[in-house]
Structure formats: structure tokens, C-alpha cells
Amino acid sequence: MKTDQFLHIELPLIHTELRNHFNIDNSRIDHFTFDYDFIDLLELLNHICCEKIFYFKSKYKDFSFLGLGVSQTINGSDLNQYLTHHPDSYLTTSFSFEENPMTAEFTLPEWTFITQNGKTKLHVQKSFEYKNFSAPNLFFNLNFDLNHYDPFIPPWTSYEELPEHDQWTSMIDECNSALECGELLKIVMSRKKIFEYSEPIEPIAFFKSLIDKNSKNNSYQIFSQTFFGSAFLSITPEQLFSIQDNIFESISLAGSAARGKTPEDDQILEDYLKTSDKLIREHKVVTDEITKLLTPLSQKLMVYPLEIMKLPYIQHRAAHINALLKEHIKPLELIHLLHPTPAVGGLPWSIAKNKIAELEPYKRGSYAAPIGVISARYSELAVGIRSAIIEREKLTIFGGAGIVKGSTPEEEWVETGVKMNPFLQVVNHE
């Protein structure tokens, strides 16, 4: 279905359907469901005018999700019971890296679009604020189309690195000391670039430009706006897991190399990625830890052979992991078990956690935290790396690197910079 057709033909029909229940006793009607042919949810973003927006497109599955507004918030302690009684509801979740997932809150949007298998389903719930169904014009502006708006990203006015280069070197040296004495097997350190602007950045315009400039980058597409002018954006390649009918799928992703400028150079870098003792150890730590944690919960578990995941700007060691879970394993239990994997945290985590808090000059927040969609029927969580945060006139871009024996500060500084390149293309108008 064309976006214009949905906006100008279907939306008025939805409006009429909802208005029929505004002035009557509708206590028994708590939601509506509408079925359509395929709707491009990314295109739909061009017309959205509400504050709360959650867009999620899977890298690995035929699954796209768009949630608008807030119908209900559910505490982690109530999640399993809620999903049991509402098996058709899809909840959005966005954690903080430092947060215990069991204490998190989950959001049921007012309007939920789900696109799968060439079809789009729309669930409409009552508003948390108004206790009734919100009119479509609270979510969509039919007189506005971002395609006709010049999504100009203004030039930044100031810029800083956090940590700066010298502090980064000291951080990695201290990590290497802990690695050499056997205190740590691996630790992931991050840094960020912060750009200040003279006027607010339009989050959706920035996100659309990010997707456009990285159209060949096969990754998740994630946009989470909590307030007007404030949003988390990610084009992460990393899946935490998906689960459907007790079939668990994940990926062990660790070890990176640049892309070559010629096919010959690229093959040399790929061979290095496959044979480097440092990168093999870095990847093995991640794979072994995930399988160790999953084995007690699984009836069957399979780790697939090594793959090289090639993105336009970087390549990674990757191994898919599938499992048939035992009955009654819940999504939140898996999040709590797996986050953070050694790919974004470290091992042993009890020690790496304290070292990260000690050395990194900020809290990570949404960076490298789980983000995605949960339901009784299907759940999928990505890991929020290759990400940035927009806060009105400020843009913060993150990059991280796994530190194992043999890591050098300069190599890891360059690697983290490469991982920020997709966002820098937008910042620098490349």
C-alpha cells in the first residue's frame, strides 16, 4: 500500500471507526486491529508529528515495527504476567547499559504497526493520558512530508572527544595491566565524539539521512524518540537474540578489521581477521560465554562455523548461535542472562563492570544496551552499538573496542573512529 493511500484514504476510515466509540460505553473495547497490504514504515516516519516514536527494522528477520504514543507502561516484575494475558500485544523496550533489566519498564504504544511477510497489521490501543482512543491527527500531519523538507543538518559549532587521546591511552594501558596479570580475559572500552550546534537537530531528518547514506549497510535500523528533539539512533549489526516458539537465535560478533580499498587489500584484511591470534581469542571469549550461559536453558544448541560479516566500512568475525530452549523460558530472563555479552562488556563481568565504571568518564546509558520489541509470540532485541544520541542542539556518537592481550591504544583508537564513520558521513555532509 502506498503511503499516500494509507494517509488519505485509510486514516479517515480509522478516524471514523474510533469516533463511533468516543461517546458510548466502550469499556469492553480496549483495542482495534486493522490489516493492510505492505506499508513502508520508514516512509511513514515522514508524516509523524507525535512525541513518542519507536521504529525498529530487523537485520536478520522479515520484521519491521513502528510504535507511536504510550498506551501503558509495564514494570519488569509484571512483564511475564502481562504477556500471558495479552499474547497479541507488542511492547517496546530500551534499556540503559548500567540498568538491571529486571527493574526496567516496557511500553505498549497506542498505535503499533507490524510489517511481516508483505503485510502490515495496525493495533490501536487507548491512550494512557486520555483513557480513550486518540484521533489520528495526534500522530500524523497530512500537510507535512519530510520528503519535501530540506533535511539540512547545520554545521557544528564546537566539538570534543571524550576521553581525549592521552586519557584513552592511559585507559587502555590500565586494561592491559589487568589482562597481563590474569584479572581480566577481555574488556570493552568506549569513547564518544560530541558535536554542539547553534540550532536544534531534527531527529527524524538526521535518521533518514543516516539510512540514505548507509543504504548498503545491512544492519538494524533503530529510531527511539522519547521527547521532541531527543532521540537514540542506531544502525547496529549486532543481535542480542530473537525468540519464537522456543527457537532462540543470536550471533557472536567480535574482532574487527578495516575494509580494503581494493579487492586484494580487502582479502588481505579478511585473512588477518581469520588468522590473528588476538582476534581469534577476542571472538572465542564471546562465543564461549554465550554458549555457557545458554546450555542450561537449552534442549539443543548449535554454534555455526565462522563467517566474516562485511559492512561497507568494517568487517567482523561472526558466528550464528541457535538453540531450542526448554519450555517456559521468558524473554526478560534471557535479557538478564545475556546482557552484557563479552562483545560489549567484558569477562569476567563482575570485574570488567567495575573497571569500566572506574575508567570511562561517563555512563553509557543507551549505548551498547539491549533495545527492541517483546511479545508472547515473537521477541527480538538488538545491541545498541553503532549509535548516537540527539539532544536538541547536541549530537553524541559512540564507538567501542574489545581489549584483549595484544591490544594497543592507537589501534583501538582508530577502530573506534572507524565505527563512528556512518554517523560522521551525515555530520560532515559526505
Image: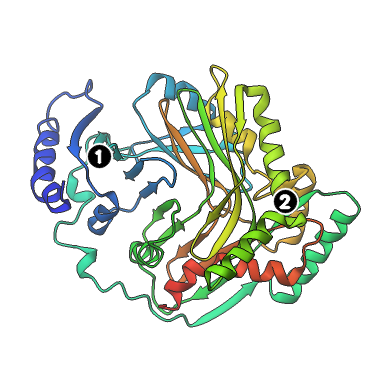
Residue at 47% over, 21% down: 81
Give the labeled residue for mark 2. Answer: 280
Q: Nearer the viewer, residue 213 or 194?
A: 213
Residue at 70% over, 66% down: 412
Q: Amino acid at mark 1?
A: Gly
For this view, does 401 lie left or right of residue 12? right
Q: Is residue 160 above or below residue 174?
A: below
Q: Residue 339, can we see it?
A: yes
For this view, does 219 lie left or right of residue 88? right
Disc ID at residue 220: none
Element marked by disc 2 = helix
Disc ID at residue 118: 1
Q: Dividing the image into 4 quarters, which one contains the C terminus?
A: bottom left
Residue 55 lies, in percent from the top left, at: 37, 49
Q: Earlier in the sequence, mark 1 or mark 2?
A: 1
Q: Residue 69, can we see it?
A: no
Q: Nearer the viewer, residue 219 or 345?
A: 219
Q: Please identify the residue farthest to the front as the structure is shown.
A: 264
Q: Amino acid at mark 2?
A: Ile
Q: Quadrant of residue 390?
A: bottom left
Residue 207 lies, in percent from the top left, at: 38, 62
Q: Please identify the residue farthest to the top as the structure is shown.
A: 327
For this view, does 73 lie left or right of residue 308? left
